Amino acid sequence: MSLSKKLRKYTTFLILAIGLINIVPCEGGSLKNSIENQNDEDISDDKELPKNFDDIVGKDFVFTEKNGKNFSFKKLKDKIVLVGFSATWCPNCPVVLKSLDTLKKKIKKANIENIEILALNIGSDNIDEIKEHYKNYDINELSVYKSVSSSSINGIEGVPICFLFDKKGKTIKKYLGWHDFAHNNFIKFLNELSKKAD
C-alpha cells in the first residue's frame, strides 16, 4: 500500500474517532441529547416536524444521480424511507453517513424489502466533490446525488440530521446529531415499520 493511501486511511480513522468524541450536531442540538438518543430507538415524535419530504426540500426537488438519472420522492411510495442530510464541511457528518452506509449494507444483506436509505448533501452542487467525500470516508453503499440548495430547505436546524418517513411519505421521526442507525435494534424497528399495514 502506498504512503498516500496509508495516510488517507489513517486520517479517515482519526477524523471518525474525533467525530465520535465530538458528536454534537454542527448547528443546533446538544451533546446530552445526542448521547441519550444514540441507543434510544423510539424517539418521541416532534410536533414541529415537517409533514412530509416536500415540506423540507420543496415540491420540485428531484434526486439526480451521478449518471444524470432523475427520480422524485413519490417513486418511493410504499417504502419506509430514512433520509440523512449532511454537508461536506461538517466535521461530525461522516460518522452519521458511515452509520447510514452500514445500515444500508445490513438491510441489503438481510434481504429486507420496503426500506430505502438515502443521503443528501446540503450546499456543494458539485457531484464529483460529494463522490470524493464519500470515497474519503469509505462510504460505499449510499448513492451519490446532486445536492439540495441550503436556501430551499426547511425544518433543518443543523447537520447531521435525519428524517424517517412512513409508507405514505409522512414524516414520523427526526434524528438530530449522531445516532447508531446500524444498531440491530434500529434495524428491527425499521423492519417492523415496513411490515405494518397502511
Image: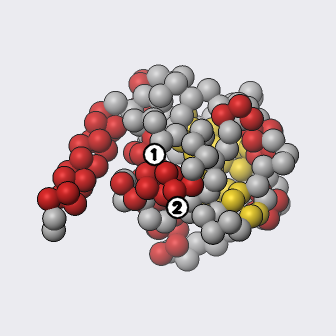
190 or 23: nearer the viewer: 23
Residue 96 — which label?
1
Tell me: residue 144, above or below residue 49: below
Quarter placement of the N terminus: bottom left
The answer to which image quadrant residue 19 occupies is: top left
Horizontally, is 43 left or right of 184 in the view? right
- Which type of secondary structure does the marked residue at label 1 adopt? helix
Tell me: residue 58, above or below residue 1: above
The answer to which image quadrant residue 116 occupies is: bottom right
Quarter placement of the C terminus: bottom right
3 or 51: nearer the viewer: 3
Q: Residue at x 48, y 75 (%)?
A: 109
Amino acid identity at mark 1: Val
- Look at the image and tell me whether residue 36 can be seen: no
Q: How many marks?
A: 2
Judged from this view, the residue extending furthest toward the right is 59
Horizontally, is 126 left or right of 149 in the view? left
40 or 120: nearer the viewer: 120
105 or 41: nearer the viewer: 105
> For the residues carrying marks 2 and 1, which lies nearer the camera in this image?
2
Q: Residue at x 46, y 36 (%)?
A: 89
Q: Looking at the image, do the residues carrying marks 2 and 1 touch, with CB atoms under 8 Å apart? A: no
In x, y percent, where is residue 68? 68, 66
- Which type of secondary structure does the marked residue at label 2 adopt? loop
From the image, tell me which residue sits under label 2. Answer: 142
Q: Residue at x 52, y 24 (%)?
A: 27
